[in-house]
Image: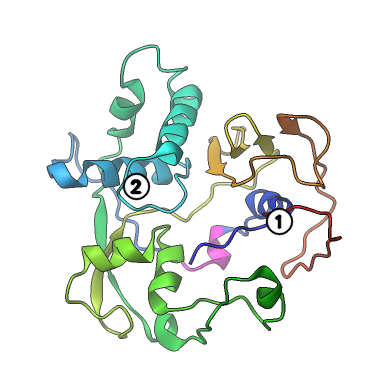
């Protein structure tokens, strides 16, 4: 299930992600040896998405299908990491320096299948009446953990039960650790991105945001906005007038 999150909430999440020690870690395999990983023809697009995600440049949901989000993430990667990609496919060549496998094994735990899982209505007002906007299935919960679509998990694991503890499945080899908190968050309407510029303690990162017009809380400029983070809230609540547009 895809849920469009208010842009203000996305900014807080991007800037205030808790340290890796406080969050469940995914089984990201460490790269071993040198050289380029041999990639099956049908897996090349998936590998590019996984490598971009591992580098901190989100393509949104990893689904193995090239699209505008992947192209924008690659452009941001080339701009930040290889100086604008003056050489053709410079970004792609730089990405392959990470020779970790595209997929790794993961054993589903009892906590993964525990739930509770809920039926989420499509209507936004109906959603507002739910006690919690939870996961609809184990596949969706695992998809968020591994930054991918439930459909991709199912296609990678034919014949496997995604709702059974003890089942070993194949998942994207993404990273969840964060070297340091972002000191600054940049929202760029021109390319639909939310990014954290590099600092002495962390490399740059870029994320997709769904907004195509400035929401009511962001009127500082047509293509970029400035915010000051005044505090943190682990379980935030929001209010909105009828005229506000967040989705």
Name the residue located 62 percent from the left edge and 59 percent from the top edge. Answer: 18
Q: Looking at the image, is mark 1 or mark 2 earlier in the sequence?
A: 1
Name the outermost residue toward the top: 86
**Magenta span main SS:** helix
Residue 87 located left or right of residue 135:
left
Residue bearing the label numbered 1: 9
Name the residue located 54 percent from the left edge and 59 percent from the top edge. Answer: 20
The part of the image, by quadrant, that contains residue 97 is top left
Dot 2, how many residues are within 10 Å of its Cα: few (below 14), some (14-19), or many (20+)?
many
Name the residue located 64 percent from the left edge and 47 percent from the top edge. Answer: 181
Picture coordinates of residue 63 (x, y %)?
34, 53
State whether residue 135 is above or below residue 241: below
Q: Which residues are magenta?
A: 20-24
Residue 230 located left or right of residue 141:
right
In the rendered view of the protein, which quadrant contains the C terminus?
Answer: bottom right
Q: Nearer the viewer, mark 1 or mark 2?
A: 1
Q: CA distance from mark 1 to mark 2?
A: 25 Å
Judge by depth and name the residue closer to the eye, 67 or 176: 67
- Residue 238: tell me if it is visible: yes
Picture coordinates of residue 169 (x, y %)?
24, 70
Name the residue located 40 percent from the left edge and 78 percent from the top edge. Answer: 138
Judge by depth and name the residue closer to the eye, 157 or 91: 157
Picture coordinates of residue 156 (x, y %)?
22, 63
Residue bearing the label numbered 2: 50
Picture coordinates of residue 73 (x, y %)?
46, 36
Judge by depth and name the residue closer to the eye, 89 or 82: 89
Residue 149 located left or right of residue 36:
right
Disc 1 on helix, strand or loop? Answer: helix
Residue 25 located left or right of residue 200:
left
Q: How is the image coloured?
A: rainbow
Judge by depth and name the residue closer to the eye, 127 or 123: 123
Q: How many marks?
A: 2
């Amino acid at each position: 299930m895809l849920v469009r999150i208010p842009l203000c909430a996305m900014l807080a999440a991007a800037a205030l992600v808790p340290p890796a020690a406080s969050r469940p870690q995914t089984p990201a395999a460490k790269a071993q040896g040198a050289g380029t990983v041999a990639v099956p023809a049908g897996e090349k697009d998936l590998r590019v998405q996984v490598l971009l995600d591992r580098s901190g440049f989100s393509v949104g949901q990893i689904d193995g299908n090239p699209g505008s989000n992947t192209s924008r993430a690659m452009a941001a990667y080339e701009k930040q990491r290889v100086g604008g990609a003056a050489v053709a496919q410079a970004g792609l060549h730089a990405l392959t320096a990470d020779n970790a496998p595209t997929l790794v094994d993961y054993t589903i735990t009892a906590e993964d299948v525990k739930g509770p899982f809920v039926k989420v209505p499509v209507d936004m007002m109906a959603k507002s009446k739910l006690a919690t906007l939870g996961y609809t299935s184990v596949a969706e919960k695992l998809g968020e953990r591994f930054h991918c679509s439930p459909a991709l998990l199912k296609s990678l694991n034919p014949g496997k039960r995604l709702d059974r503890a003890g089942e070993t499945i194949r998942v994207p080899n993404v990273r969840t650790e964060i070297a340091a908190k972002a000191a600054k968050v940049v929202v760029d309407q021109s390319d639909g991105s939310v990014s954290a510029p590099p600092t002495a303690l962390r490399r740059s990162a870029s994320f997709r945001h769904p907004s195509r017009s400035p929401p009511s809380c962001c009127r500082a400029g047509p293509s970029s906005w400035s915010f000051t983070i005044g505090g943190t809230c682990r379980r935030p609540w929001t209010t909105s007038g009828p005229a506000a547009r967040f989705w």
